Amino acid sequence: MITVCHLIDDLSPGGVTEYLQFLQDHPGMTELAHHKVIPVSRFHPARAQIEGDVIVSHLGICWRGMPGLVALRAQHPKTPLVHVEHSYCEGFAALNVPHQRRFNTLLRCAYALFDRVVAVSAAQAAWLRRIRVVRAELLTVISPSVLLSAIEDLAAPQEPVRRIGALGRLHPQKGFDLLIQAFRRVQVEGARLMIFGAGSEELALREAAMGDQRIRFCGHVPKILALQSCDAVAMPSRWEPYGLVAQEARMAGRMVLSSGRDGLGDQAGSGVINVRDYTVDAWAHALERLMTLPSANTADLAFARPTLETDSQRCLQGWRLLLADLCPPKSPQPVQAEGAIVGG
């Protein structure tokens, strides 16, 4: 069995660490390979003890980290290197990158060090192809999954939506500031906004809530408990390479209000309402509309609760194909019969 070493530079709770837990522990993944998660420095990954048949980077790419990636490639010249792009997408670049050509050069130089680049959504892959930072034949899409089978046991809400959940780190990316402003305009009896997460924007978000008693900051809690506490989930993200929370919410039978940005667009369908205009008015209207539906699991939106196994199998198949390509099985060596004469 091959060994796959997954390099990570940030072990804080979140989608990446949940995904790595899936890669380590899902029975289908353990049949494919032995997966080792190795914490490393983003700037000096080659200093870690790395021994495996495939090395997978889950690192954030930056100019300061380029020498470390070059050293990693030089130290493991014959080992297949894979990079999973968790950080960047079209929405991120549009809002955070002042010098697009310089940024594209960074990605092009970094990706050239890897044998494969994995996009976490079709939207992200399409953007990487458009800006021409990776050769098409070296790019593959594997959407992540998580080890949360218990999530399917949660009862889907049957009453009208009143408790809106917002799950994620408190960072401008997540758009919780816009959500709070929109929610404060909602005039529905019993409405609640429950924000689950921690981060640098907490003080600013509390100030934006302006003492509205309907808005509660719950801190970081286990995902199961957060989903159990709400009737629907709001994701007003300004950018989102994939957005595991949307997948998890739908698995739990919770409808999702989504910005549809980047990878969130991959998850459009039953149970997801995309708010096309990124404005306070549009989100306030969408929240009120959701709360006026007859039930949280209303049939008129054709909500179909997906299964965890479906998403897991897609992820598993993606890794199966990738690893088979990078480490094809070796043909068995012919066994020489005793006494056989070799040669002419």
Image (cartoon, helix red, strand yellow):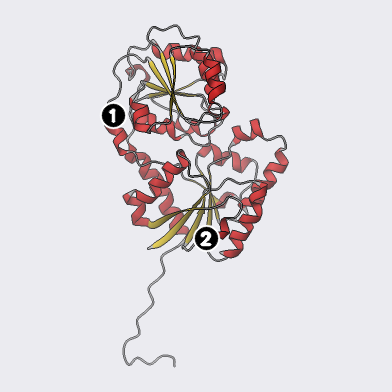
Where does the N terminus fall, quadrant-wise?
A: bottom left
- Could you say which quadrant of the image residue 217 lies in? top left
Q: Residues within 10 Å of mark 1 (few under 14, many from 20)?
A: some
The amino acid pointed to by label 1 is: Leu
Residue occupying image coordinates x 37% and y 79%: 334
Which image quarter: residue 81?
bottom right
Tell me which residue sits at (33%, 12%) in the image.
294
Q: Name the residue tied to disc 2.
A: 80
Return the residue nearer the eye: 214 or 336.
214
Q: Give me the residue at 41% from left, 65% from top.
A: 329
Compared with residue 88, is residue 184 higher up or lower down, i.e. above or below? Answer: above
| Lateral position of residue 162 relative to residue 285, left or right | left
Neighbours of disc 2 within 10 Å: few (<14), some (14-19), many (20+): some
Residue that badge 1 annotates? 154
Residue 93 locus on image (x, y percent): 64, 35
Chain-order first, disc 1 or disc 2:
2
As helix, strand or loop, the secondary structure at mark 2 comes to loop
| Residue occupying image coordinates x 41% and y 33% | 247
